[in-house]
Amino acid sequence: MVKREVKMRAVLGFAIAVSVLSPIASAQEAYPAKPVRVVVAFAPGGFADGVARLIGQKLSERLGQPVVIDNRGGAGGNIAAKLVAAAASDGYTLLVNTAAMSINVSLYKNPGYDFRNFVPVALTGSTPGLFAVHASNPANTLQDLISSARAKGLNYATAGVGSSSHLAGDYLFRSLAGLNATHVPFQGGGPAVTAALANQVEVLSLSMPPVVPHIKGGRLKGLAVSSLKRVAALPDVPTVTEGGFANFEERSWVGYFAPAGTPAAIVKKLNSEINQALGMTDVRARLDALGLEPQPGTAAEFSTYVKTEVAKWAQIVKTAGVTAD
C-alpha cells in the first residue's frame, strides 16, 4: 500500500512538472509571441537606420509580429549598446549597430559595455565610405577640395565620434593631406546629411547609403569613395586612390546583436530570418542601389568577423592617437 502511494505520488509529481514546463516549452517554440524591439544606435535617416527599417519590415512579415524601430543615437552608438546590454536575454530586444561598435571599445576608456555583453546575431552587409560636398561647392575632385583648403582648412561632418567615417576623415584630411581639419560629429548619418544639404558643413565623410540618393538627385556632389575600386551605385565617382592617396580603403558594416545569454535557438532563428530577408530580390536591389553589399552568413561567422574588426580598429586608433575621452 505504501509503495503504491509512493508510486502514485511520483506519477502525480511528474504530471505536475510536465504541466508546469509545457507552457515554458510552448513559449520558447512560439517565439516571437509579442513585438520585437530593435534599438538602432544612430538617428533616423542614416546607414544603420535605413538597413534596420528595410530588414525590419521583412522580419515583421516573416515573424508575424511587429518589429519596432527605436532610435537611440548618441556617444557614437554607446547609448544604444549600453541599453541593449542591460535588456532581458529573451530575443525581444535587439541592437543594430555599425563598425563604430568595434571601434568604441578602443576609442573610449569606458564605453559602458564590451562584447561579452552581447551575442552577434547577423551581419547584414558592408559599404565603403564616401566623401561628398554641397552641389554649389566649386570643388569637383578630391584634389580640388584639398587644394582650396590648404590655406583656410576645412570641417567635415560624420555620423559621430568613433565612427569609421570619423577615423577615415581624420586620417585622410589631417594625416595624409596635412590640413587643418575640424571634425563635426552628429548623432547619425541622417543629421549629418541634413547639415550638408543646408550647406552648413563643408564636407561629408559618411558611409554610402544615406548619401547616394542626394548625389543622384544633384543636391550633393560625390568627390571620392573609400573603396579600392569604383562602386556600381556611383560609377562616376572616383576612388580616394584615384584622388592621389594610394591604397586608401575604409568600409563600415551594420549588424544585429542580442544581449548575452539569449537562447541559441532564438539567435539561430533570427539569423535565418535576416539572411532570408537579405536574399529577397527587392531587398537586394534596394541595398545594391545604395552601395551596400549584402553579406549573409551564420552567427558564428559574424562573431569571428567582429573579433577581427575589434583588433583591426584597436591598432588604427592607437596609430592615429584619436580618443573620445
Image (cartoon, rainbow, N blue to C red):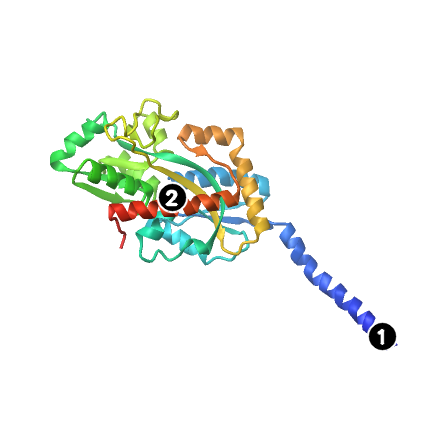
From the image, tell me which residue sits under label 2: 99
Residue under the point 27% across and 52% down: 324
Where is residue 286? Give x, y as percent: 46, 30
Amino acid bearing label 1? Lys
In the rendered view, tell whether residue 214 sits above or below residue 267: above
Residue farthest toward the bottom in the current orientation of the protein: 2
Sequence-wise, the earlier of marks 2 and 1 is: 1
| Mark 2 vs mark 1, CA separation in Å | 65 Å
Residue at the spot 74% in from the left edge and 65% down from the top edge? 16
Residue carrying label 1: 3
Q: Is residue 80 visible?
A: yes
Residue 198 pos. (x, y %)? 26, 35
* Residue sitting nearer the eye, 300 or 253: 300
Instruction: Tell me what residue is drawn at x 36 percent, y 29 percent.
Output: 213
Kind of residue at badge 2? Ala
Q: Residue at x 26, y 39 (%)?
A: 169
Quarter of the figure that contains the N terminus? bottom right
Considering only vertical position in the picture, is 129 above or below 38? Answer: above
